[in-house]
């Protein structure tokens, strides 16, 4: 088998019809059917079976499909690396950013663009746990995530550690630091989904002091959450970055005493995999800024 046959097989599995796969590959159906037959004869195994109008992949086919994806991906990485050797002026920077983003990121990207004006960008925003999956799946090469996470597969560049703040409407009579014990009496809407990132860190902090916070909801739409807080509908506990990224609201922010409620932010990339020159240059720039 060769890489061309593997690409044919991937198309057949994903399209589930020879005609659709042939159209995707811009070839006629008979040669594609012949290539499939040749692969099955070479391997001595049936790779797909007809089920009504569609083809279903066999167990042997599933095994081949897994390796076909890996091999074609490695081939693409090899070609990309060869093309970009010694040439960091062009390329594409693919990066994921945490839902709360990174306050310095716009300025860093502006500086990067000045140095590499021909580089294009793919920027995706999501929760930190999902960003790890995007990096593993090679959807993005780099990601700025909130730690801690399971990062055995990744190289990590620590950027900074930031504190969390209690945020309430300006109508609340507060002018000092507050404790977690005081905060358990406020109706809190947390800026994250249950079980992920910030949500977990906040609940874990209350748990350490055997406190039961009054969590009335969660809201990952940060603009809406800031509007709700401003109106007096609720209060919240948020990382400092969120305050920097969303200024101008009628809110008050207070440090939380005695809880050591903070989180680290890091830049991650996959270990033992090729990094584009654009990604390498971005990492180098990040190192100079932090």
Image: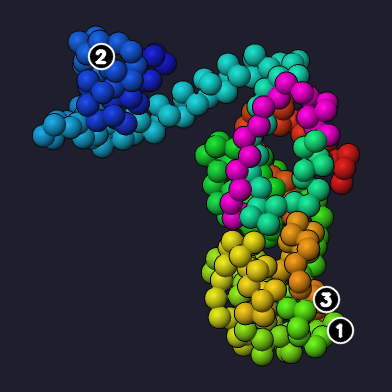
Rendering quarter of residue 68: top left
Q: Nearer the viewer, mark 2 or mark 3?
A: 3
Can residue 169 be seen here? The reply is yes
Q: Is residue 167 above or below residue 94?
A: below
Residue 286 drawn at (x, y percent): 82, 40
The residues bearing labels 2 and 1 have C-alpha atoms spaced at a distance of: 73 Å
Q: Is residue 267 above or below residue 197?
A: above
Element marked by disc 2: helix
Residue 206 drawn at (x, y percent): 67, 82
Q: How is the image coloured?
A: rainbow
What span is colored magenta in the figure?
111-128
Give the residue drawn at x 76%, y 83%: 171
Q: In the image, which disc is placed on residue 255? A: 3
Element marked by disc 3: strand
Can residue 263 be seen here? The reply is no
Dot 2 crowding, Cα within 10 Å, few <14, some 14–19, many 20+:
many
Q: In the image, which disc is placed on residue 175? A: 1
The residues bearing labels 1 and 3 have C-alpha atoms spaced at a distance of: 10 Å
Quadrant including the N terminus:
top left
Dot 3 crowding, Cα within 10 Å, few <14, some 14–19, many 20+:
some
Q: Which circle's residue, 2 or 1, is located before the other in the chain?
A: 2
């Amino acid at each position: 088998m060769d890489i061309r046959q593997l690409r044919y097989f991937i198309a057949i599995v994903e399209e589930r019809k020879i005609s659709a796969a042939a159209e995707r590959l811009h070839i006629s159906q008979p040669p594609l059917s012949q290539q499939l037959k040749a692969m099955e004869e070479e391997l001595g195994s049936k790779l797909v079976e007809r089920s009504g109008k569609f083809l279903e992949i066999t167990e042997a086919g599933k095994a081949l499909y897994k390796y076909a994806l890996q091999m074609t991906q490695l081939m693409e990485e090899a070609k990309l690396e060869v093309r970009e050797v010694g040439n960091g002026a062009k390329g594409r920077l693919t990066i994921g950013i945490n839902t709360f983003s990174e306050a310095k990121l716009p300025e860093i990207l502006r500086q990067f663009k000045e140095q590499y004006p021909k580089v294009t960008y793919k920027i995706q925003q999501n929760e930190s746990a999902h960003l790890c999956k995007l990096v593993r799946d090679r959807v993005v090469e780099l990601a700025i995530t909130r730690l801690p996470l399971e990062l055995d597969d990744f190289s990590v560049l620590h950027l900074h550690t930031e504190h969390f703040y209690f945020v309430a409407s300006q109508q609340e009579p507060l002018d000092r630091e507050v404790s977690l014990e005081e905060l358990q009496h406020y109706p809190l809407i947390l800026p994250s989904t249950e079980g992920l990132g910030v949500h977990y860190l906040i609940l874990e902090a209350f748990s350490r002091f055997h406190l039961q916070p009054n969590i009335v909801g969660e809201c990952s739409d940060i603009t809406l959450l800031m509007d709700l807080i401003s109106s007096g509908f609720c209060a919240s506990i948020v990382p400092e970055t969120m305050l920097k990224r969303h200024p101008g609201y009628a809110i008050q922010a207070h440090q939380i005493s005695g809880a050591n409620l903070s989180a680290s932010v890091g830049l991650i990339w996959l270990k033992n995999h090729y990094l584009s020159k654009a990604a390498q240059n971005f990492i180098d720039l990040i190192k100079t800024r932090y």
